[in-house]
Image: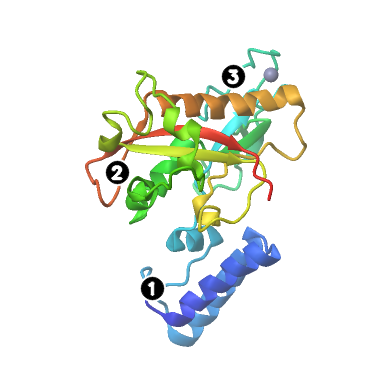
């Protein structure tokens, strides 16, 4: 935003929301009131320079939106469905309806008088879950300049004979095969693509910037209650299916260094790192 004082207010409401849990509605009220005061004092701003009216717009201007996809979830068994399923879908596992009843909306007060009674609104899922698959998260990860060279820097390091200093010195990294039976990280096509070793850390220490928040990809949430072991399998399935696809086929990402796209394949590890 061109005006510094408007930027200050935008930072303020974003901070109040994230740090002090001011709701979207509360932050919106602050923005609308301040916008009204500014317009009284200084005349109306044009739309291009006006104070945003909602916190959602503030997040969008700062490009700090989350990148989750909201999936409908079966209320009973937590089967995860694609976001665009038909509202009449029944869960194939437990035959429960995924969506709730239609809520009635009273449209008597519509200005054009088109409505003359309650009408049925959209059916909404009984339960939803925000999920970000690794394949989606990597698309955003590689849009940042410098990430291609950052993930390839291990290729130029020198290994000290007989010493194990990092994951790349280990046996698994050097012996892991791709789906064609070639070395995953040293095979004939490994230099033409980005080959990633992704660790799922159970307990981790701080190594360089590996665990900085912007480099962590949070896969999803499972609702207000902790799911049972059986329910958790549905969340794990969608994540594991994505990992298998990333290992076998890979994805094409567009980066500042490769605007026409480059293939990324992923090898995943589980670490239990206690120090
Ligand atoms: Zn179900």
Residue beneath disc 1: 49
- Residue 31 drawn at (x, y percent): 56, 70
Q: Residue at x 62, y 59 (%)?
A: 24
| 143 over 98 or under it: above or below | below
Q: Residue at x 39, y 24 (%)?
A: 178
Residue beneath disc 3: 88
Check disc 1 and report its element: helix, strand or loop.
loop
Check disc 3 and report its element: helix, strand or loop.
loop
Quadrant of the rendering where the N terminus is positioned: bottom left
- Residue 159 drawn at (x, y percent): 41, 46
Check disc 2 and report its element: helix, strand or loop.
loop
Residue mark closest to the camera, 3 vs 2: 2
Q: 47 or 62: nearer the eye?
A: 62
- Residue 23 drawn at (x, y percent): 67, 60
Q: 225 or 109: nearer the eye?
A: 225
| 145 over 2 or under it: above or below | above
Task: Assign ligand 1 to one image quadrant.
Answer: top right
What is the spatial separation of the Cα atoms under label 3 and label 2, in whole angstroms?
A: 37 Å
- Residue 219 drawn at (x, y percent): 57, 39
**Chain-order first, disc 3 or disc 2:** 3
**Chain-order first, disc 2 or disc 1:** 1
Q: How many other residues sit within 10 Å of disc 1, few (<14), some (14-19) or many (≥20)?
A: few
In the displayed orientation, state which residue is furthest to the left.
260
Residue beneath disc 2: 254
Q: 245 or 13: nearer the eye?
A: 245
Q: How many other residues sit within 10 Å of disc 3, few (<14), some (14-19) or many (≥20)?
A: few
Which image quadrant for residue 192? top left
What is the spatial separation of the Cα atoms under label 2 and label 1, in whole angstroms?
A: 32 Å
Which image quadrant for residue 124? top right
């Amino acid at each position: 935003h061109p005006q510094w004082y408007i930027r200050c207010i935008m930072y303020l409401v974003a901070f109040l929301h994230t740090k002090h849990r001011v709701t979207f509605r509360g932050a919106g009220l602050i923005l609308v009131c301040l916008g009204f005061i500014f317009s009284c004092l200084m005349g109306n701003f044009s739309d291009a320079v006006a104070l945003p009216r909602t916190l959602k717009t503030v997040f969008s201007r700062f490009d700090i939106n989350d990148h989750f996809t909201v999936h409908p979830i079966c209320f009973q068994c937590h089967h995860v469905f694609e976001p665009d399923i038909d509202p009449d879908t029944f869960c194939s596992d437990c035959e429960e309806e995924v969506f709730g009843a239609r809520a009635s909306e009273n449209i008597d007060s519509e200005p054009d008088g088109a409505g003359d009674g309650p009408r049925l609104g959209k059916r909404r899922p009984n339960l939803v879950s925000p999920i970000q698959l690794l394949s989606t998260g990597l698309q955003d990860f590689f849009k940042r300049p410098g990430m291609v060279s950052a993930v390839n820097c291990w290729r130029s390091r020198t290994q000290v004979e007989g010493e194990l200093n990092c994951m790349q010195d280990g046996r698994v990294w050097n012996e892991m095969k791709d789906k064609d039976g070639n070395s995953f990280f040293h095979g004939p096509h490994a230099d033409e693509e980005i080959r990633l070793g992704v660790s799922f850390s159970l307990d981790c220490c701080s190594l360089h910037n590996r665990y900085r928040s912007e480099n962590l990809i949070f896969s999803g949430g499972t609702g207000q209650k902790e799911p049972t072991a059986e329910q958790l399998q549905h969340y794990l399935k969608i994540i594991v299916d994505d990992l298998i696809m990333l290992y076998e086929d890979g994805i094409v990402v567009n980066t500042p260094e490769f605007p026409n796209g480059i293939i990324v394949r992923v090898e995943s590890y589980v670490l239990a790192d206690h120090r």
